[in-house]
Image: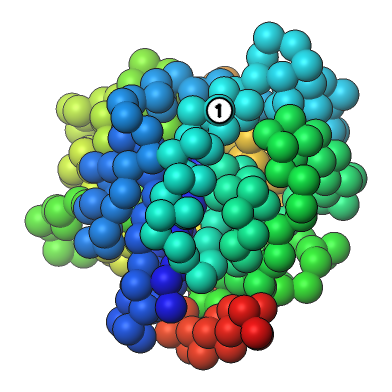
Amino acid sequence: MRVLLSSLPAAGHLYPLVPFAWALRCAGHDVLVAAPSDLVPEATATGLPVAAVTDGPIGLRDLLERLRRLPWFGGDHAILGSLHDFATGADDRSPLTDLVEQTLPGTEALVRDWRPDVVLRDMADLTGVLACARTGVPFAEHWWGLAAPAPARGELRRIFGDLFARFEARTPPRRALTIDPVPPSFQSDDAPPVYRSRYVPYNGRAERPALPPRSQTPRICLSFGTLLTGDGVSGLAERVLDAAHRLGAEVVLAADEPPVESHPALLAAGRLPLDQVLASCDALVHHGGSGTMLTALCHGLPQLVFPHGSDHFVNADRLRSLHLAAVLNARDDPTRVERTLHAVLTDEGMRAGTRKIADEIAAQPAPADLVPLFEATVEDLAA
């Protein structure tokens, strides 16, 4: 069987597909990643074969910054009226349309040339599913986070309908199945039916740091994911580091471009494998991204979240509602940051809750366990 991977062109969207893609590869199937040239270095680092679907860069960082500001979820989860126009280009703010216009021609050409049996898309990908609609190839969906609330799903269906019409994809594509690696008790209460899978962290190419042996000193990991970098988070990073230092804690800063490189509380900073680093930590402070959040839940770690945009607010509220994390505003003062960080480190109820979620994640079927189901479902569609 041939499986083509298609994701929103960002590392945080590609990474969740990698463990299942390798499960397919180890079962003997051909797997190919479709990626714009900007994402090819990250994609080839997975060890999977990659095909570029653009002739040159598409200005990925600028495009992703525009997408990150998409007015999808506000702090109160309101679906803003401008979402539809913003996403489909009814005004001059149309990053999703820009993205599809640049990546769909090459992706569709690849589908017609390589002729996959199925396209495996991440839950935010548009290009792959449009290519399926234009070629008749079925798709499967792999989630990486909380399902959109019911009102948002209605708006998303409207957006998809308009985009399908705009790009002349007249026949709805056939869906094989949906795989969800979010633990059932953590997933949104009104999520649609899915096949459950264990969340297996993949953090890209990074070297495990040589950290000092564990001691009685609390160890905190600070991470802002793959998009938030540099000056935009330097002030917040300083406040967290200062608070940790006053509490007698040490910090490992996992960031492609560390906003702070020297501080008395800092043990290591740089592009680090989050899954490996968290194994020796007591808590995680982060921005609210789904991959970061789920990796911490795999390790049973309490979290302190400073949500910035997109799905961060939904993730933060879900964590807080289940007493798995504390949530602050990125502009909160140093005293409140220190007080809240101390609470996260010492709240045994929160730690017990996160360990329970970690046990639940470990009990879900491994990606390899879903391969026979995936094979059978795709074969049924082809029959």
Residue 107 horizontal/vertical position (percent): 47, 44
- The quarter of the image holding the C terminus is bottom right
Side (left or right) of 91 relative to 218: right
Give the residue displayed 20% in from the left and 28% down from the top: 261
* Foreground residue among 279 and 348: 279
Give the residue displayed 47% in from the left and 54% down from the top: 111
Residue type marked 1: Glu
Name the colour scheme: rainbow
Total numbered circles: 1
Residue 312 horizontal/vertical position (percent): 62, 40
Give the residue displayed 36% in from the left and 16% down from the top: 231
- The image quadrant of residue 195 is bottom right
Residue 262 horizontal/vertical position (percent): 18, 27
Q: Is residue 301 visible?
A: no
* Foreground residue among 192 and 214: 192
- Check the image and report above or below for 214 versus 229: below
* Foreground residue among 115 and 352: 115
Give the residue displayed 71% in from the left and 58% down from the top: 173
- Check the image and report above or below for 29 versus 290: below
Residue 154 horizontal/vertical position (percent): 88, 46
Residue positioned most to the front: 113
Side (left or right) of 142 relative to 211: right
Q: Label 1's element?
A: helix
- Check the image and report above or below for 151 versus 16: above
Q: Which residue is mark 1?
A: 101
- The image quadrant of residue 265 is top left
